[in-house]
Image (cartoon, rainbow, N blue to C red):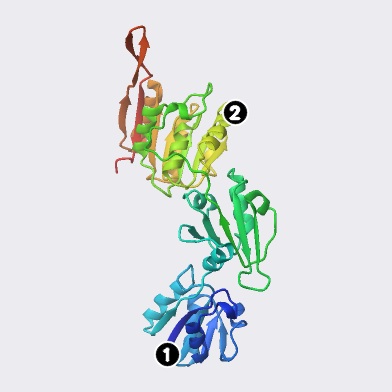
Amino acid sequence: MQVNLLALGGGTDATLTRQARHALLQAQCIVGASRLLQQLPEGCTVHRASATKPQKILEALQESGCTQAAVVYSGDTGFYSGCRNLIPLLEKEKLPYKVYPGISSVQLFAAALHRPWQDWTLVSAHGVQCDAVAAVMQGSPAFFLTGGSLGVPQLCKQLTEAGLGELPVTMGENLSYPDEQIVTGTAAEMAVRSFGPLCVLLAEAAPQPPKRAPGWPDDWFIRGEVPMTKQFVRAAAVAALGPKPGQTVWDVGAGTGSVSMELAAAVQGAPVYAVECENAALALLEENRKKLHAWNLRIVSGKAPMALKELPVPDAVFVGGSKGEMEAILSAALEKNAEVRLCVSCIALETLQTVLHFCQTRGLQPRVVQLSVSDARSKGRLHLMMAQNPVFLVTVHCDD
């Protein structure tokens, strides 16, 4: 049996390539989604089997008994296509196959908008989980295939809830069909509208957080009476935690959010959870989040450890304040992830003692670093060094 994997483009006869049309007309049986089987060009075989799961497609091919078979997919076989999951099964069964490309929805949409698409961030939300906020934070327009539980309104709701309600977005519905529709608006406007199942979405790039190494200047942050981890201590804490793109991070006792903001920039769109219970601090967190474009920063109002229960598993946790619940906070983090990277900032010796005692009882090997920072201040013709409070940073699993 020769199996041809065919992309049908937009699903209409006008977007079918001549190469794919020839392979379709030669096929003795055709397998694919029922929607596609109903839209095949005239002259195709009537021997058709509706199947979308790779194993079911393989079974339909094997049961057909034909020597020339075709499996049809919408769009392009190389762009988020189910084709990639069928190929390993064909190779395992030693069935010869050939892949035919097609016109993808991103090509159709870009052409309809009169825009190039080579710099877009391409994301699938079709039947899979998708973080729209992370996508628009990559510095370029984000194109979304939609489907399943994540349609245009749901994706735009994610953006709106992150503070990006004014972000320009464009929806494309039924591309290449006679009832094709293109609608432009804001994420907030699209979040409350309804669209059909065959839609794509283009969201413009979100304003970007600062691009620089850890240790942002203190005067970048809106300040108040709320404590803030200062520049050089912050730089050391972020470096010790080593946040990586895509990782989930907690900042417990976030204060003004200076550490949270830098962590949010470092993970490049992945979620950072800033946990805080003081109203004044929560207000500053939101102000700094907007000022520094930390759209992936999710502010959690509540006192730890209770506020940590519903948070996702962290890869790294910074503790800047504990309200006397240090051991419970560290326990909550370790219960979620036994290998989580921990960094605790301690000013009081009693806090340091608590953290070290906790590590000892848990069999953890902490690293303790003391940081003493002094700034030169002018006094007449002289400059005197003015010391900041010395800080202990206790880290666990950060050197592994």
Q: Toward which corner of the image does residue 92 lie, by quadrant?
A: bottom left
Query: Relative to 76, is 400 on the left or the right?
Result: left
What secondary structure is marked by label 1?
loop
- Within 10 Å of disc 2 (Cα), the crowding (few <14, some 14-19, many 20+) is few
Query: Relative to 268, is 191 on the left or the right?
Result: right
Q: Residue furthest front?
A: 114
Residue type for callout 2 = Asn
The one nearer the camera, 298 or 327, is 298
Q: How many marks?
A: 2
The one nearer the camera, 306 or 210, is 210
Task: Give the residue pinned by disc 1.
Answer: 1
Q: Position of residue 298 (x, y in %)?
A: 54, 41
Q: Toward which corner of the image does residue 360 lie, by quadrant?
A: top left
The one nearer the camera, 264 or 352, is 264
Q: CA distance from mark 2 to mark 1?
A: 69 Å
Q: Position of residue 261 (x, y in %)?
A: 47, 37
Q: Which mark is residue 279?
A: 2
Residue type for callout 1 = Met
Query: Which residue occupies 62% across, 60% down?
Result: 171
Query: Which residue occupies 43% across, 39% down?
Result: 317
In the depicted structure, whether residue 12 falls above or below residue 287: below
